[in-house]
Amino acid sequence: MGRPILMILSILLILCLYWEATEAQVLTPVPIITEIENINKSTATIEDSVLIENRVMHSFSQMDKQDQFYICIKGKSIIDGKMMFKIIKSDGTVILNEEFPSCYLLNYGFEGDIHSVKDREDFIKSRISDFFNENNFLHPAIQPNESFDEDYSDKLIWDEIKSDQTSIGFSYLIGEEDIRMISFSKKKGKVVMYFNCC
């Protein structure tokens, strides 16, 4: 008499354990977590997608090695994207990493219809294409006959870069009047801006 009751209780216990395990599997929110992760990845992909880019190899931080100059626009559109400008040494070290709204590439050179998306996009594309023109690289960064101007330069940085006639400068324009001239400071081990106007 005791054995059948014990057997029935054992069967009921096994069924209860099986039911709890099955219910736990049904309630596990793994697919929901995966879906949220996929949504986040999808959003990040849209924001991080490269729409246009340009890169060149050029001597900069060292005379005998070339650094990679890289510019791109990421985001949903060329006009409303994010411009990224990087300089990467030959050993992979990032020595400059700047970000601006891509509309900062519009400047006084724009002669199209300001209300035309196509005109603005075409102008920004041309700026990306021409950003690393050879005439933007200066060697030496500061010519011996150039004079210091305290309104646009820091004296210590200017003197250091000017005294190094092996220094290489790079000049670029952001916005309408933000002209920047940068070089690699061997003393500081980083990129410095030795001229900024206006």
Image: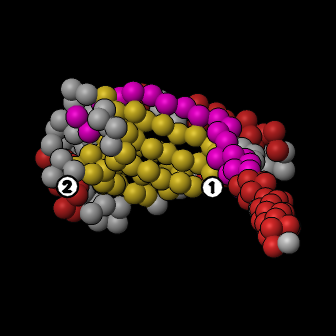
- Name the residue located 39 percent from the left edge and 27 percent from the top edge: 57
Q: Which image quarter: residue 143? A: top left
What x and y, as percent, mark residue 157?
22, 58
Mark 2 belongs to which amino acid? Lys
The reply to whether the magenta stretch includes residue 100 is no
Mark 2 vs 1, N-terminal side? 1
Q: Nearer the viewer, residue 37 or 108?
A: 37
Left or right: residue 113 compared with residue 128: right
For the question of whether residue 79 can be seen, the reply is no
Q: Which image quarter: residue 32? A: bottom right
Q: Specify the segment rendered in magenta.
A: 38-62
The answer to whether residue 151 is above or below residue 82 is below
The answer to whether residue 135 is above or below residue 185 is above
Tell me the CA gap for discs 2 and 1: 29 Å
The answer to whether residue 67 is above or below residue 82 is above
Q: Nearer the viewer, residue 191 or 176?
A: 191
What x and y, as percent, mark residue 134?
42, 28
Which label sits on residue 51?
none
The answer to whether residue 92 is above or below residue 160 is above
- Name the residue located 55 percent from the left edge and 32 percent from the top edge: 54
What x and y, as percent, mark residue 18?
80, 60
Left or right: residue 59 compared with residue 12: left
Badge 1 crowding class, 10 Å Cα cut-off, few under 14, some 14 to 19, many 20 or more, is some
Write down the residue under mark 2: 188
Q: Nearer the viewer, residue 183 or 85?
A: 85
Secondary structure category for the residue under label 2: loop
- Name the residue located 45 percent from the left edge and 28 percent from the top edge: 56
Mark 1 belongs to which amino acid? Pro
Asked whether the beta carbons under mark 2 and mark 1 sit within 8 Å of each other, the answer is: no
Secondary structure category for the residue under label 1: strand
Write down the residue under mark 1: 101
Badge 2 crowding class, 10 Å Cα cut-off, few under 14, some 14 to 19, many 20 or more, is few
